[in-house]
Every structure is written in structure tokens, then in C-alpha cells.
Image (spheres, helix red, strand yellow):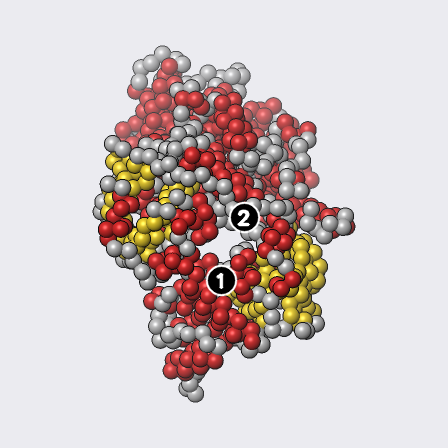
């Protein structure tokens, strides 16, 4: 039994995707959180709507009832994927920075400047904007990390504060340097034609950024699980003291993980600009970082699940939007559902409930078995 | 003799699925000292936690004076007359001994104010009654570990304990203090007190106890009157097979100096000098043991040597290289490996896989990255598999998380990594703490084979037997200083060491300086 206690059952058919039950069960809980939040949404609709059946149908099936809704979902997945990936990296290193919000926003501003002023051929133009936005976003990402390393300032707090700072810096740049003064509403000068990303499907807004996002999912997965830098990030996340003891330079790892995370945010902001707009017209910060939190949590910090969770969030959004425009339930009701998801996933006890119960049961059963066999429970 | 406490078919399963107690039946008689022995992880502590009300049993029952009891918390157990002295004391260091004694049950004046004078009087009376000498008005920080322990015992007696549980009380004591404690415990027993003595040191159990109950693997294996049983029987019951109690060890052939340590000093956050001008030279092909009561600077010394604390003075040199206050990365690069004293918080990353843990100090080497940034999975798997096999780490695959391993196998992961590192100096701290006997034997043999390969090994352990049997030469630390050097570890007795460990004896400077081999 000395051996047996540490051996596990071989993975079943699901083992293709999940190497063992330890990974499968939290995945099931995640699925539960998603389904539960949808059901709660339906319940909510029945509480407040005058024609609940119609609204519920629009909410759950709406995204698939119209072709354009499917494209909307795909478009909405793009920024969610980028902030989700960025937060996967931060969460893997067991840090909590939300500075990717600034990286995304300032990335969009940077891309705007490049989109207006740089004279580059098509294809190269948005690529240069992404690179510039990513770099700026990366350096912004460094700030909370530096504050943390130098003065042990909690990176969650400092990043939230810095997000305000960068929002106003971004607005300032748009207002004073890039604004189109001939427009009555707040808008930047128009982008050059070369800056705009090509459409994947004519007459829809679905742009090439969707493919770029897909490429980045692969890149980030490889980065986290197949490179030494990804290994270092995962090790400081698993046990920072251990990482230092084993000879990793923990500050260096914290710095570049935040840079990479910020870089992803910046690229996401640039793609949003080049893919959907003709000029910078955001009146407010869209705050995709908070959505990224949900995406990263639903993906269990694993980049390869980010598209799936980004799709789910996009599905909820588009469904809610579709429903609200055809009925009497406000779009904002999905914030409740998102809160519910976070609540469920943030609770370790719920996530590990099945595992704890299974372990306890098998242990008791095994003990009783051993005793019945007459060995007194020893062997 | 009548039975005072009885456990019937007691089971305890923790949330992580560990069955720590499996249908345990235990009988404690009034007025006896019962030894509870077993390896680390045999379930002794869990059983006592259940008895003391800190854990609720999963099934089975507990009878006190023949009546079933169910404790919701240790408060209930204390009220029922059960007291426990933990391995780690639960005292307020800044308060006096008297204040600690009455904490939670303070004597009050008529006005309702705290009556400090009476607290001191109570302490004096109890101290005299039970012949446990303490200084009531001294503060806990200022008194010795053994006095703190006496205070802990008095605390339980003050709260009316009829059954006293002592969890490995001798682990912090010198041999002399241990003898003293045993005499006091026997006197308590003669006054009618019931004592449960948890230990994994057989010698002590034979010295002190009336009966002994052996646990292994969460179950009670047997209970014996101490007169009817010999050490070998108990030892076999503890381990489940024959163990050799001695190590075969060839004489050492020390070579050149590998690590030159000069005049290290360290002051902790409280301004206490923990390491005080420590100098020695560690030679190739020898195990240099560091002996001392826990907390006399050994941990801090190791932390300085491995880059986890900064020395105020002096230097650490390895050949040409100056490693004084270098970061861990550079120290490792220079060829110094380090088995950390605490595998749970420092020595391993529990959520990470065995392979990830084993590769932590070498993942960036060309063999595993091909010179670039990409990890070569096959090379990593092969390396991990090799270490797993060589160090007999019991697991289903190297991709299993370290958290799912037993203590002994976890430690083998740490040892496996450090002992296969490209290092010729090994700083080994508490290599077998909380490890089962099978693994201990293996780790001990590995340490000796490393020595025979010509590696220089600094061994720090609070298990005196371990240091004595493994070391070739010894230094003794007391209050941060080296107080003795013994070139022949095998020629030193426990008693003699005890005198140095307590600071009662100090060798003269000249003798100690010989450890520099200059």
C-alpha cells in the first residue's frame, strides 16, 4: 500500500485533454459556474420581464439566430482574448496587477498616433502600430512591478490607481495632440487607409485581428509551457521562496512577466483601433481588463482555454445585447451574472469541493476495507 | 489499574483525503505514563489532536472515565481535564511566566482588577507543589527553553488537567535537561497524574514510560508493558520490518579545503546576535556536523552560506571565488548545493510537478534548452525520470504534483535535485525532518556516498543521533558562537556534547581555531 497510496487511477478518455482528475474536476466546476450563471440569468429574466419566454429565448439563442450576431461574438472575442491572455500570465506568476487596463487603453492611443501620422504600406502599418503599442503597453506594465520590487507596494492597489492616471494621460494626448478639431464630438484625426485591418468577411466588421488573436493564443501557450521564461513565471507563481532558493532571479521574472502582460494588452488595444474604427472615438475607457479577469479565471490561468472562455463571455454579451434591444430587460443585467461567475470561481472551497469529497470518501472506504481484510488497517 | 481514557475505533480523515487515523483503539490507565511512539506521520499527533478536541473524529468514539465524550474544541477538552503541551510552545514572550500561567483564568481583586501579586503567588505555589522550578516574575523571552516547557506543563496543571499530553517534549532539550524533565514527570505520575508521552525516540520511552503503544500508518500496532518488551520489537513494529540501527561507515579521507568561512556575524530583526564571528573550513570528502540546541544560530549560518541572509562581517570563499553575500543563483553556479531545512515552504514548489521541481536549478542549462529559450521536453523528462529512479521517489509519473507525495518522497525530490546538482559543496539542513525510517536510511546512505565521492558536506540537524552517526568531525554552536570542535565525531559522547550545547563548557580559542585547518 505504500506504493498504492501515491498512485492514481489512469486517466480515462478525457485524459486527452485533462491529464488527471485534479484538472478535470475544477474544469467541471468552471462549467458549472458558466451554466449556473446562465440559468440564474434566465431566472432573473422571469422575475423582471413582462414577456419572459421571448426574452429568455433571445438571450440564450439570440447569438445564434442571426448570422451577424455570430460575427459580433467573434469580434467581441478579440479584445477579451488579449486581456485574458495578459492576465493569465500575471495570474500564473501569482501576482494581481490590473495594469493591463492602462496598457490596453494607452496601446489604443499609441496606435492612434501611428495610424494618423506614420506613412507605411498596408500590412506593415498596423503591424508597426501593434509593435509600438505593445512596447508602450509593456513599459506601462512594468510600473506596478517596479513599485512592488522596490518598495513592496501591493501591485493590485498601485495598478488600480495608475489606471486612473493613464486614462487621463491618454485623454490628454488625444485631446491636445491628436484631436480632429473639425468634429463636434470628441474624435481623433482619421486614420490613414493603410492602417485599417482587412475584413475577413465582406460586409461585416469581422477583421483580421481575429486571426492575430488566434496566433497570440498559440504564442502565449508556448511561451508559458515550453520556454524557460514561462517556466520561471510558473515557478515564482508556484512558490516564490522556492524560486529564489533554486537560484531564479525573482525580481527579473516579475519584471518581464509584467512587461509581456502589458505588451499583450497594448497589442490588443492597437488591434481594436485598426480593426473596428476609423478614428479614436472612445469617450470612456472600455476597461477590458475587468473582462480579462473573468476570461482568465474561466480559463483557469491556462492560455489554451482563453478562446473558449472569451467566446462564452462574448456569447453572454451578445445575447444580452440582442435581448435588451428587443425586450424590456436591460443589458446591464449581465454584470450580475459575471459577478456570480467570479464569486463561484474565486471560492477555493467550491472549486475543490468534489476533490475533497472524493478523497475523503475513498480514504474512509479503503481504511474500512483494509480492516475488513483483517489486517487491522496496517497493510 | 482503571482506565481513564479510551479511544474506540477512532478514524480521522482530513479534507485532502489523508486517513491519519484508521480504527484506532487506545487505552490510557489512570496514573501511568503511556508512551505513544511511531514514525513521523504515523498518526500520533492526529490522535492526540482528536483527544485534545482540536480535531473532530470522522468516526468512532472517545470515552473519558467510561463515558462517551465529544469535544467541540480544545476548550471542552481542557474543561474535561485534558491538557496538552505542544511541540511549539504557546506562550506570550513579552509577558512574565506568572502572567502566562494564569492567562485566560486571571485571579482578580475584589474590585475586578487583575491581581498580579496573586498570579505570582499561584505560580510559586504550583511550582513548589509539583516541583517544577520556574521564575514567576521573569519574562518568557528571558528564560531558557526548558523553563518555558515547565511553564507549559504548569499551565495545564493550573487549568486542572488530569491527563497531560506531551508532544515530543525533548526535541528542544539537551540531554541534561531531558533527564531533569523525566525525573519531574515521574514525580508527577507518583502524585497520580496521567501522562501521555509522544516520541519517536525509543531510548526515552524506555527510560520514562510504564507502557508503550506503537502506531504505524495511522493504526495502533501494539501496546506493551515496558518491562516485557525490548527495543528491537518496538522498532520492528514501528517500521514494519527489520531495520539496522547502525550505519556502516568507512573512515573519512578529508582533502583540500572546499569552503572557507571566516568571521561571519548576523543580527536578527530583534537586534539579537544570532551568529557571532563564526569561522571554519569545510574540506572535501568530509561530513562536518553542526550541533546545537535549535535556535543557536545554525539556521542563520546556513542562510548566510546559501545567500538567504547577509553577514555583517567576514567572508565566504570557495577557492578563488568570493561568495560573501552573493545571491543564491551565484552561489549555486559556484558549485554549492543546498538542502533547505523546510521543504514545505522553501525546498519545493508543492503545486508544481516533480519534474519542474527537479529541474529548478538547471532548467536553463544548454542540455535542457538547446542554448535557446525553448525547453526540450524529452531531455527534461529523461533527467527527471533518472533522478526519480535513482532516488527511489515513489510516484506514478514525474508530472505528478509534489503536493501529492508523502513527506519522505517530497524530501527525496529535494535531495534528488541537490545531490545531482553540479556541486562539490553540499549544505544539508535537517535532511530527515518528518521523514519515515525507510527514507531516512536511504538519505543517510546517500549522504555518505556523496562524501565518498569527495564532496564537502556541511550537515546541520537537530537530530543529535543523526549528526553523530553521519559526521566525521563536529562543531558545536551555542548562542551563535562555535564553542567546540571535535575532529573525531565518533569519539564524542552525548553527555559531553550536552555540556557544550548548553554553554556550560567552552573549548579554548586555540582548540576551536584548529577547525580552520590552516
- Determine the image quadrant of residue A351: top right
Is B47 positioned to the left or the right of B378 in the image?
Answer: right
Whether B43 is drawn above or below A7: the answer is below
Q: Nearer the viewer, residue A178 or A40?
A: A40
Is B236 positioned to the left or the right of A95 in the image?
Answer: right
How many numbered circles are shown?
2
Q: Which mark is residue A17?
A: none
User: Residue at left 35%, top 32%?
Assistant: B335
SS class, disc 1: helix
Q: Which quadrant of the rendered structure holds the N terminus of chain B? A: bottom right
Query: Residue beneath label 2, please?
Result: B245
Q: Which mark is residue B169?
A: 1
Whether B425 is drawn above or below B297: the answer is above
Crowd band around label 2 with a 10 angstrom C-alpha radius: few (<14), some (14–19), many (20+): few
First-in-chain label (2 vs 1): 1
User: Residue at left 68%, top 73%?
Assistant: B2
Is B483 positioned to the left or the right of B355 in the image?
Answer: left
Q: Nearer the viewer, residue A118 or B349?
A: B349
Amino acid at each position: 500500500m505504500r506504493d498504492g497510496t501515491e498512485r492514481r487511477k489512469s486517466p480515462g478518455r478525457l485524459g486527452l485533454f485533462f491529464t488527471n482528475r485534479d484538472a478535470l474536476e475544477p474544469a467541471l466546476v468552471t462549467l458549472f459556474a458558466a451554466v449556473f450563471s446562465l440559468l440564474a440569468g434566465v431566472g432573473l429574466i422571469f422575475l423582471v420581464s413582462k414577456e419572459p419566454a421571448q426574452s429568455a429565448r433571445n438571450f440564450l439563442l439570440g447569438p445564434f439566430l442571426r448570422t451577424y450576431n455570430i460575427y459580433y461574438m467573434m469580434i467581441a472575442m478579440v479584445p477579451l482574448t488579449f486581456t485574458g491572455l495578459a492576465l493569465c500570465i500575471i495570474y500564473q506568476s501569482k501576482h494581481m496587477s490590473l495594469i493591463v487596463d492602462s496598457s490596453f487603453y494607452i496601446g489604443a492611443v499609441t496606435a492612434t498616433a501611428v495610424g494618423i501620422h506614420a506613412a507605411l504600406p498596408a500590412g506593415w502599418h498596423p503591424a508597426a502600430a501593434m509593435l509600438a503599442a505593445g512596447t508602450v503597453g509593456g513599459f506601462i506594465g512594468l510600473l506596478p512591478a517596479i513599485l512592488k520590487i522596490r518598495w513592496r507596494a501591493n501591485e493590485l492597489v498601485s495598478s488600480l490607481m495608475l489606471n486612473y492616471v493613464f486614462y487621463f494621460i491618454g485623454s490628454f494626448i488625444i485631446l491636445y495632440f491628436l484631436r480632429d478639431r473639425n468634429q463636434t464630438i470628441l474624435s481623433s484625426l482619421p486614420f490613414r487607409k493603410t492602417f485599417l485591418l482587412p475584413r475577413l468577411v465582406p460586409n461585416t466588421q469581422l477583421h483580421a485581428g481575429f486571426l492575430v488573436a488566434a496566433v497570440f493564443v498559440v504564442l502565449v501557450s508556448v511561451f508559458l509551457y515550453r520556454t524557460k521564461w514561462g517556466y520561471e513565471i510558473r515557478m515564482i507563481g508556484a512558490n516564490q521562496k522556492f524560486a529564489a532558493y533554486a537560484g531564479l532571479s525573482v525580481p527579473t521574472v516579475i519584471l518581464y512577466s509584467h512587461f509581456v502582460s502589458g505588451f499583450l494588452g497594448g497589442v490588443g488595444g492597437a488591434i481594436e483601433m485598426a480593426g473596428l474604427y476609423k478614428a479614436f472615438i472612445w469617450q470612456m475607457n472600455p476597461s477590458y481588463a475587468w473582462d480579462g479577469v473573468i476570461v482568465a479565471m474561466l480559463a483557469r490561468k491556462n492560455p489554451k482555454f482563453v478562446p473558449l472562455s472569451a467566446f462564452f463571455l462574448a456569447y453572454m454579451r451578445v445575447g444580452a445585447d440582442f435581448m435588451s434591444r428587443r425586450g424590456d430587460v436591460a443589458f446591464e443585467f449581465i454584470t450580475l451574472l459575471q459577478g456570480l461567475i467570479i464569486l463561484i470561481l474565486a471560492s477555493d472551497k467550491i472549486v475543490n469541493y468534489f476533490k475533497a469529497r472524493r478523497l475523503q470518501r475513498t480514504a474512509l472506504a479503503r481504511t474500512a476495507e483494509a480492516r475488513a481484510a483483517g489486517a487491522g488497517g496496517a497493510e | 489499574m482503571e482506565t481513564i481514557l479510551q479511544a474506540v475505533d477512532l478514524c480521522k480523515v482530513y479534507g485532502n483525503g489523508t486517513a491519519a487515523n484508521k480504527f484506532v483503539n487506545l487505552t490510557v490507565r489512570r496514573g501511568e505514563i503511556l508512551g505513544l511512539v511511531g514514525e513521523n506521520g504515523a498518526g500520533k499527533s492526529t490522535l492526540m489532536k482528536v483527544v485534545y478536541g482540536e480535531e473532530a473524529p470522522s468516526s468512532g468514539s472517545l470515552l473519558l472515565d467510561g463515558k462517551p465524550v465529544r469535544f467541540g474544541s480544545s476548550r471542552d477538552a481542557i474543561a474535561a481535564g485534558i491538557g496538552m503541551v505542544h511541540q511549539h510552545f504557546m506562550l506570550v514572550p513579552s509577558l512574565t511566566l506568572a502572567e502566562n500561567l494564569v492567562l485566560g483564568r486571571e485571579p482578580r481583586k475584589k474590585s475586578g482588577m487583575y491581581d498580579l501579586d496573586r498570579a505570582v503567588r499561584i505560580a510559586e505555589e504550583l511550582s513548589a507543589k509539583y516541583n517544577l522550578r520556574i521564575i514567576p516574575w521573569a519574562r518568557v523571552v528571558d528564560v531558557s527553553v526548558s523553563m518555558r516547557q515547565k511553564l507549559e506543563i504548569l499551565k495545564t496543571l493550573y487549568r486542572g488537567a488530569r491527563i497531560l499530553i506531551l508532544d515530543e517534549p525533548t526535541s528542544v532539550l539537551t540531554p541534561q535537561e531531558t533527564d531533569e524533565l523525566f525525573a519531574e514527570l515521574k514525580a508527577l505520575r507518583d502524585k497520580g497524574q496521567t501522562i501521555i508521552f509522544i516520541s519517536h525516540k525509543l531510548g526515552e520511552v524506555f527510560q520514562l514510560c510504564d507502557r508503550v503503544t506503537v502506531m504505524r500508518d495511522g493504526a495502533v500496532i501494539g501496546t506493551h508493558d515496558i518491562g516485557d518488551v525490548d527495543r528491537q520489537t518496538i522498532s520492528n513494529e514501528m517500521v514494519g520490518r527489520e531495520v539496522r540501527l547502525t550505519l556502516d561507515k568507512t573512515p573519512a579521507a578529508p582533502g583540500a579545503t572546499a569552503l572557507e568561512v571566516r568571521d561571519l556575524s548576523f543580527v536578527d530583526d530583534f537586534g539579537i546576535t544570532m551568529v557571532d564571528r563564526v569561522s571554519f573550513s569545510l574540506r572535501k570528502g568530509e561530513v562536518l556536523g553542526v550541533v546545537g540546541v535549535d535556535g543557536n544560530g545554525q539556521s542563520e549560518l546556513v542562510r548566510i552560506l546559501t545567500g538567504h541572509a547577509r553577514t555583517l562581517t567576514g567572508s565566504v570563499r570557495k577557492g578563488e571565488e568570493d561568495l560573501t553575500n552573493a545571491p543564491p543563483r551565484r552561489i549555486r553556479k559556484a558549485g554549492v548545493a543546498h538542502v533547505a531545512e523546510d521543504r514545505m515552504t522553501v525546498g519545493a514548489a508543492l503545486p508544481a510537478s516533480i519534474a519542474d521541481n527537479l529541474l529548478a536549478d538547471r532548467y536553463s542549462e544548454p542540455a535542457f534548452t538547446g542554448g535557446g529559450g525553448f525547453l526540450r521536453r524529452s531531455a527534461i523528462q529523461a533527467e527527471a525520470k533518472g533522478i526519480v529512479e535513482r532516488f527511489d521517489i515513489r510516484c506514478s509519473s514525474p508530472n505528478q504534483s509534489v503536493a501529492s507525495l508523502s513527506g519522505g518522497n517530497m524530501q527525496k525530490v529535494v535531495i534528488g535535485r541537490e545531490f545531482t546538482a553540479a556541486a562539490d559543496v553540499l549544505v544539508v539542513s535537517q535532511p530527515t525532518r518528518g521523514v519515515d525510517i525507510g527514507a531516512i536510511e536511504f538519505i543517510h546512505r546517500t549522504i555518505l556516498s556523496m562524501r565518498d565521492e569527495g564532496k564537502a558536506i556541511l550537515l546541520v540537524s537537530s537530530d543529535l543521533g543523526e549528526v553523530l552517526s553521519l559526521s566525521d568531525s563536529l562543531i558545536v554552536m551555542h548562542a551563535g558562537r562555535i564553542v567546540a570542535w571535535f575532529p573525531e565525531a565518533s569519539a564524542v559522547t552525548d553527555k559531553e556534547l550536552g555540556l557544550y550545547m548548553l554553554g556550560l563548557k567552552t573549548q579554548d580559542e586555540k582548540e576551536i581555531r584548529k577547525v580552520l585547518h590552516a
